[in-house]
Image: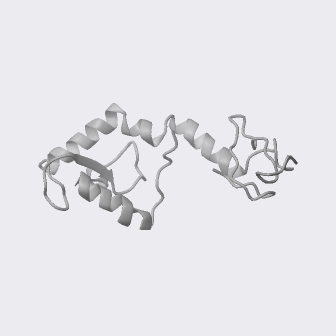
Amino acid sequence: MPICKKCNRNIKITKEGVYRVHTINKDSKEPCANSGMPAPDWYHQWQQKKERDGNTYRDYLASEHWKLISEEAKRLANYRCQVCYRKGTLHAHHRTYERKGDELQSDIFVLCKECHDVFTKHIQPHRKYPAPNKAN
């Protein structure tokens, strides 16, 4: 959520691409000067990319394409976690999001639920490559 540069508050942006009407602080009735103003350029670029890509990351993970890719990754890993070699609930995880939609099998690795939880909590936040938009 973007921060309004006038009042330094987290402000939602409407679907029309303008800052939602808001006050200068939570206890005030005085409207902020940015209320109704156009959103920052980065927001418009992000919206255009989202529209161009056609769906969110969550939508992508629910797609038939991703199901096929992740199932193939699990099959190639012999239905075992590629870290601890356990069987059970497995997650196909992106090494990189650079080719989202056109992944190579080397872009995906397979983790059990426990290793996936450790990875997403402790290792993934320190990545050098950008994470996908996970909105909605």
| Left or right for 127, reference 136 | left
| Left or right for 99, reference 4 | left
Q: Residue at x 19, y 58 (%)?
A: 82
The image shows residue 40 at horizontal and vertical percentages of 73, 51
| Left or right for 12, reference 37 | left
State the colouring used for the structure image: one colour
The image shows residue 20 at horizontal and vertical percentages of 75, 41
Q: What is the number of callouts on the image?
A: 0
Front-lying residue, 7 or 129: 7
| Left or right for 47, reference 71 | right
Front-lying residue, 22 or 50: 22
Question: For the view shown, which residue lies furthest in the front direction?
Answer: 27
Quadrant position of residue 124: bottom left
Q: Residue at x 15, y 51 (%)?
A: 77
Q: Residue at x 87, y 50 (%)?
A: 33
The image shows residue 22 at horizontal and vertical percentages of 78, 45
Q: Residue at x 18, y 55 (%)?
A: 81
Front-lying residue, 39 or 88: 88
Question: For the view shown, which residue lies furthest in the top direction?
Answer: 64
Q: Is residue 104 above or below residue 67?
A: below
The image shows residue 7 at horizontal and vertical percentages of 79, 57
